[in-house]
């Protein structure tokens, strides 16, 4: 498989180069030059275990990896020890139409583990093929969950140094605690004054700066990324959409392989839903993608109007991992909507950079709305959904997952579409215990661990041990910088 840049179709790379580099030199994102067609293989694929299915799908994209290398990556990442079962994901019934696909049974209790547990294996394998004489310096901007998952995935990985930047007031107390207590000799955590977009933009500026690249190269490093701009983050996410589809079939929720489903995704940077779209391009039978946003509703507006406009107020919500106004991975979907016309994408992205907005053509908009529905709910509605879903279905949602459930309810009412659906459950409710507790009418007092205990008592469920265990861990990091100082901060680390 060859990869090209969304902004320059002449750039051609193999998977190892793509994974090591993270982003293309022209600022574009790497996309596969084509999609393997698996329509005729669904029945065969449905018989595979999760790990074998992952190996099969990876073998189509990581064509410069050997079968042994791929098997080693999968075997190292998706273990029972890390994900609490032979299958790293769980499909749990919600109601008559929908099943929740729980992706948060990994070490950091958010779906990011699905990709970030395997990315270090992909990266080390790639580094053996390219850049073999240098160490990787991974820079990551996080709205909360990526940071912890990346730290946990890359801690003490040989030849890798990782720095995570998070917006000072943009993550939950527990997310902050998860990051500040991270163990490992090669990890660094730093808060930035500003919001997630400030952090992401600052990281991207360092990442693409020629002088910085030369500086770190002299010190024996090259830049790599653990954000979902890295194709190595997206690829592992394709697998669980196929797996869940086959599981629906086994449960009798769909009667034949080939029957279409709806997929509902709580969305921020557009990575998870894009992976679902890629699965569809490979032959997964999908009727509609339902893209759910919180009060930062730039994506919902985009899908409804064809205009992407980030010039708007930024809200710090109870679903902080979706508090994003610049959804990086949308660029990859745009590329698909424009038949991978690199000039069109360059023009749109220039417009986003200079005017903070762009409008897509009517033919691109037609393709977009044929497959995508966009909606949003605010914090108050999110809390109502948490309460209602728990009362009526006995399902305890975290704040992000609740956004998906709420938007799906609106979609069903508006469309009357009762196609079987998978709703993506992206985090443990205990990661956002305070918000979930208050949504259920519980009394908020004490610190986040008191709230976790109160939520356990109220719902008769239990927090994962890795969340409870944070209470007694020592805080290791308290750096705080302005975004202008990110260059000197990175230099000071290496
Ligand atoms: C990252 C995250 C999201 C958003 O996923 P994207 O791939 O950025 O769209 C949703 N929910 C949770 C809990 C997350 O951590």
Image (tube, rainbow, N blue to C red):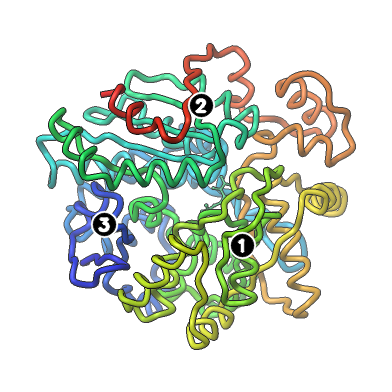
Q: Is mark 3 within 8 Å of ligand 1?
A: no
Q: Residue furthest bottom?
A: 363
| Residue assigned mark 2 | 179
Q: Is mark 2 within 8 Å of ligand 1?
A: no
Residue 464 drawn at (x, y percent)? 62, 30
Q: Few, some or many C-alpha atoms within 10 Å of disc 2 (few <14, some 14-19, many ≥20)?
A: many
Q: Nearer the viewer, mark 2 or mark 1?
A: 1
> Crowdedness of circle 1 by 10 Å Cα count: few (<14), some, many (20+)?
many
Q: Nearer the viewer, residue 138 or 210?
A: 210
Q: Secondary structure at mark 1?
A: helix
Nearest to N terminus: mark 2 or mark 1: 2
| Residue 398 visible to an observer of this rendering | no
Q: CA distance from mark 3 to mark 2?
A: 28 Å
Residue 379 left/right relative to 206: right
Label whose residue precedes the other's in the sequence (3 or 1): 3
Is disc 3 in contact with disc 2, using a CB cutoff of under 8 Å? no
Could you tell me which residue is drawn at 16 percent across and 28 percent down? 219
Residue designated by label 3: 24
As drawn, 54 above or below 152 = below
Residue 427 visible in the shown view? yes
Which residue appears at 40% of the width and 66% of the height?
Answer: 349
Q: Secondary structure at mark 3?
A: loop
What is the spatial separation of the Cα atoms under label 3 and label 1, in whole angstroms? Answer: 25 Å
Q: Which mark is residue 102?
A: none
Alpha carbon of mark 2 to alpha carbon of mark 1: how far? 28 Å
Q: Residue 205 placed where, x, y %?
A: 35, 45
Give the mark nearest the N terminus, 3 or 2. 3
Q: Is residue 427 above or below residue 268?
A: above
Q: Please tell me the numbered disc located at residue 298.
A: 1
Quarter holding the C terminus is top left
């Amino acid at each position: 498989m060859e990869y090209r840049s969304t902004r320059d179709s002449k750039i051609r790379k193999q998977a190892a180069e793509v994974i090591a580099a993270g982003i293309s030199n022209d600022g574009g994102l790497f996309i596969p030059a084509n999609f393997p067609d698996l329509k005729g293989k669904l029945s065969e694929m449905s018989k595979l275990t999760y790990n074998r299915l992952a190996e099969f799908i990876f073998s189509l994209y990581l064509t410069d990896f050997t079968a042994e290398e791929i098997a080693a990556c999968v075997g190292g990442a998706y273990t029972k020890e890390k994900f609490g079962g032979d299958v790293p994901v769980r499909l749990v019934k919600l109601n008559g139409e929908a099943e929740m696909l729980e992706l948060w049974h990994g070490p950091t209790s958010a779906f990011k583990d699905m990709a970030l547990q395997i990315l270090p294996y992909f990266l080390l394998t790639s580094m053996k093929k390219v850049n073999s004489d240098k160490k990787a310096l991974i820079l990551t901007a996080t709205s909360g969950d990526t940071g912890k998952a990346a730290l946990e995935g890359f801690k003490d990985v040989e030849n890798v140094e990782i720095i995570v930047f998070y917006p000072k007031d943009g993550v939950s107390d527990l997310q902050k605690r998860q990051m500040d207590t991270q163990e490992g000799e090669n990890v660094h955590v730093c808060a930035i004054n500003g919001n997630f977009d400030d952090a992401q933009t600052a990281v991207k500026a360092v990442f693409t700066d020629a002088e910085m690249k030369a500086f770190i190269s002299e010190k024996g490093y090259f830049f790599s990324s653990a954000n979902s701009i890295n194709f190595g983050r997206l690829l592992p996410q394709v697998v669980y959409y196929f797996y869940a589809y086959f599981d629906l079939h086994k449960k009798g929720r769909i009667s034949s392989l080939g029957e279409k489903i709806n997929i509902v995704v709580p969305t921020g940077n557009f990575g998870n839903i894009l992976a679902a779209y890629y699965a569809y391009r490979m032959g997964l039978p999908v009727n509609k993608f339902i893209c759910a946003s919180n009060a930062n509703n730039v994506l919902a507006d985009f899908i409804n109007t064809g205009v992407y406009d980030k010039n708007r107020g930024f809200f710090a919500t109870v679903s902080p991992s979706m508090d994003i106004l610049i959804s990086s991975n949308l660029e990859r979907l745009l590329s698909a909507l424009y038949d991978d016309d690199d000039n069109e994408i360059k023009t749109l992205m220039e417009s986003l950079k200079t005017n903070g907005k762009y409008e897509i053509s009517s033919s691109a908009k037609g393709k977009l709305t044929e497959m995508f529905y966009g909606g949003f709910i605010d914090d108050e509605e999110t809390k109502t959904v948490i309460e209602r879903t728990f009362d009526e279905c006995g399902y305890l949602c975290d704040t992000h997952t609740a956004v998906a459930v709420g938007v799906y309810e609106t979609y069903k009412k508006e469309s009357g579409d009762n196609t079987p659906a998978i709703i993506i459950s992206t985090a443990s409710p205990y990661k956002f215990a305070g918000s979930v507790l208050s949504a259920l009418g519980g009394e908020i007092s004490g610190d986040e661990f008191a709230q976790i205990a109160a939520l356990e008592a109220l719902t008769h469920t239990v927090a994962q041990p890795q969340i409870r265990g944070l209470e007694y861990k020592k805080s290791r990091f308290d750096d705080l910088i302005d975004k202008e100082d990110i260059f000197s901060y990175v230099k000071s680390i290496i």
